[in-house]
Amino acid sequence: MSYDSNQPNIQKLKKEYSERTRRTVFFVGAGASAEVGMPLWAQLKENLFTEIDKHTVVLNEGDPTTRSFRKLEALRNSNESYWDFFETAELGWPTVYEDFMEREFDEKISRVSVPTIYERIWGMRHVRQVLTLNVDMLLTAAFNSVVGKSGERLLEYDGFSLADSFPYFSRDNYVVANLHGTYSEKSRWIMSERQRKNLYDGALGDRYKRFIERVFSEYNVVFVGLNTSDIAISPFLETVANLGLLAKHFWIVPSPNPNTLRWAEQKGLRVVSYNPLKDANGQRTDSIDICSILEEIDTHESKDSAVQLPSTVEEVEIESLQTPELMIESVADNRLLSARKLSGAMTRINNSYGPMSNQARQFLERYRLAIQSLAMMDSKMPGYDTVHDYRTINRIASKGSSSVWLCEQSGSTEQDNYFALKIMSTSGIDDPIERESFRRGIESLFLLKKDGIDVGPDYITHYEIPLLLVMEIINGSSAKVFRENVDALEVRDVLTLFLNLCRSVLRCHRSDGAVLHRDLKPSNIILENWYPGYDVDDAITSPVRLINFDLSWHRFTTGNTKAISAEDIGFYAPEQKPKANGSLPRTALTDVYMLGMMFYYLLAGESPPDGGGRLGNWGDIVKSGVRSATQDLVLRNRLMRLVLSMSESSPDDRPDLDSVTASLEGMRYWLDYDVKAINPDYLVEYLSLTTGRGVSWNEDNLSASIEANQTTVFELRYSQRGSRVEIRFIRRRSDSDNRANFGKRMNEKLASSANLLREIGWEVDKNSNLGITGSCRTNVIAENLTQHATTFRRIADSLLGPIE
């Protein structure tokens, strides 16, 4: 191994990947294919020039061929004119150019092996999308060898169809975005300035740019096999750099020189460096190091260091404190002064050793009785109604090891100067896990405020002794109060409300603190400024705020977390059930489970049962709960599948939150029937359901299998090539069919069905007497959906009916 595994950026990358607060997407360049003999971009240009030079006779300088050759020479050494070079070569030497490209790609690719880097990327647990500048399609070959054997399907898009990949990229299907096209479709690859302009001009260019912005804003991108010249010549990466979107992404790069490091630093790109090994022949073997780095990333479980909260009181020397016995007397005489002294001493210990250190534990034990006395609050009793700089007015809530009070800052003359004060009770002080969890809640709100994320209550201040948090009061009602006070909730409103909730949680996940809430249940979700009696429309436009962060984890989390509440236990994920669950891997997918249960709660109007996804009849429970939400069969099926996938027992089987929000957006497009935005696979499922038969839906393959007898195949599926719906029907004679009439009658049915499909815009091939295949553009189906539905019911009745 020739890299330092302790590089800070490797540690950051491992955390990003394992915690899954942002999805990790790989971006591979020509360097990743170079090891099997494919040329780098600069090498491709040089080889083409050499080939043209061999076929060119330079005459006088006024000769057109000579002028073109001199222009080619000038472009040869200019990265800024990279695409002009290939355009000049193609226009001036079309035959040489075509033969050269055929040798470099068509002939060579059939002989080279699959790069091990690509196989390792596809073999990673949490990677399903790859962007590439390469035209060699070796990523496809790697997918087929690693993942395709299990029946998974890869969706492939080129630059000109990139915007069509939005729904499937976001929903976490397997996707390759061939940003420069592929060698198999040379009319659509980017290999000249003219082709580049075709891609970047007009409406297509706007959609291309939006794709770039979304990927680099929402995901964690890891570059492999690129160099700075690749970035200079690539229209895609040039746009990314110009938009300032390279910051905080990662670049795995061999032996970076000072100029490379300076460039990366200017762009905010995080470099993961390695020194390539060499084989027995002295050849570089980058793949060994890169695959080792990827293996380390893929197997990592997150462990962190503590966060540093601000000091809110002046530090006090521990030696200057009174004895515990005298401190108890001091508390009785002057609670405020005693609290300040003890808090100052604890602050000193925290800053020197950490809040969970042995020194902190010993200090808390030594002054336990004085601290417990300071934690006793009563808004009706003078002296006990004030702590540090705040006076309590009345108690808002009390549960377990803490209580929440309405308070105001002592001595303030401002109007409406009210806050919420959350204080650890005497019962929680002696439990280190309770104390650790309480403090982690403070840390999470502090990190969110530091990052400008207004999802939780705004952190105001905190004190170490007694341990308390002063925070913003969020006015409004909980999701529990909302659901109990709204009898009829339209599915459109549920989708909007739940999407708002998911986006609020995503903001926490994507914050610099990478905060995971881990206690997402109806009572902890607030619809700001909504109250019973208000309209539902007011609720779905209200900001969704989250409270109670005691179970939260964040980027700097250490240690353990307290046991889950006995209330609303059906909302908690299986990995949260053990009392000591700090040793488990940190993952945003715990929040996904709880959100899945919240989705069920909003749809069904009832809390999920304890056990959730582990119950043998959970599917039936979800189906029953979702059935009443909508009459739309496509939407009903999608809702049920989404809840079930979010509530899988194993975190690795759950979709990430990006995929969830994309699915919700897709459902809203379908519900509103937004023709331009509808995900094409919805049309596939709809047509299959209109047949009136049972349907098996394959989410990974985006295909529907219509139930029939064992001798019949009736399938519909989405094809990304040209954005089409494909049909395949094959029927062989079964025991119930009349042997004498089967061939003739089946032929008549197939011919009639093929004609019906052609009449509504399908291209159909009738395959003898056995079946038909065909396809139709999705926009044709979307614009005439009712007609297509009627036709599919007719052909299903005909093709699947008995032959007597």
Image (spheres, rainbow, N blue to C red):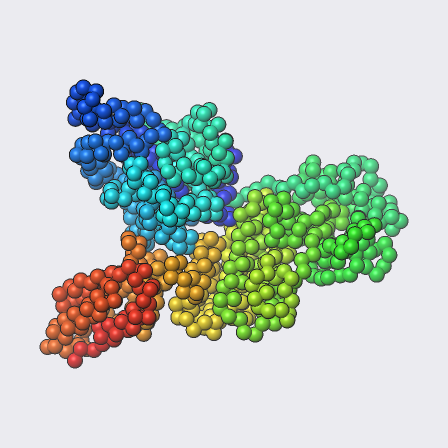
Residue 389 against residue 642 in the figure, above or below:
above
The residue located at (18%, 66%) in the rendering is 771
Image quadrant where residue 34 sits: top left
Q: Is residue 221 visible?
A: yes
Measured from the top left, where is residue 395 in percent x and y? Answer: 75, 61
Direction left: furthest residue: 740
Q: Please name whichever residue, 424 or 135, is drawn nearer the observer in this view of the structure.
A: 135
Residue 782 against residue 106 in the figure, above or below:
below
Q: Please name whichever residue, 344 or 39, is drawn nearer the observer in this view of the structure.
A: 39
Measured from the top left, where is residue 663 in percent x and y? Answer: 44, 59
Image quadrant where residue 759 sits: bottom left
Direction right: furthest residue: 333
Measured from the top left, where is residue 181 in percent x and y? Answer: 30, 43
Direction top: furthest residue: 60
Residue 548 against residue 136 in the figure, above or below:
below
Direction bottom: furthest residue: 804
Measured from the top left, where is residue 659 in percent x and y? Answer: 44, 55
The residue located at (30%, 40%) in the rendering is 195
Q: Which quadrant, please, contains the C terminus? A: bottom left
500 lies left or right of 82: right
The residue located at (34%, 63%) in the rendering is 782
The residue located at (59%, 61%) in the rendering is 542
- Number of callouts: 0
Q: Is residue 279 visible?
A: no
Q: Please name whichever residue, 3 or 757, is drawn nearer the observer in this view of the structure.
A: 757
48 lies left or right of 416: left
Residue 471 against residue 755 in the figure, above or below:
above
Q: Which quadrant, please, contains the N terminus? A: top left
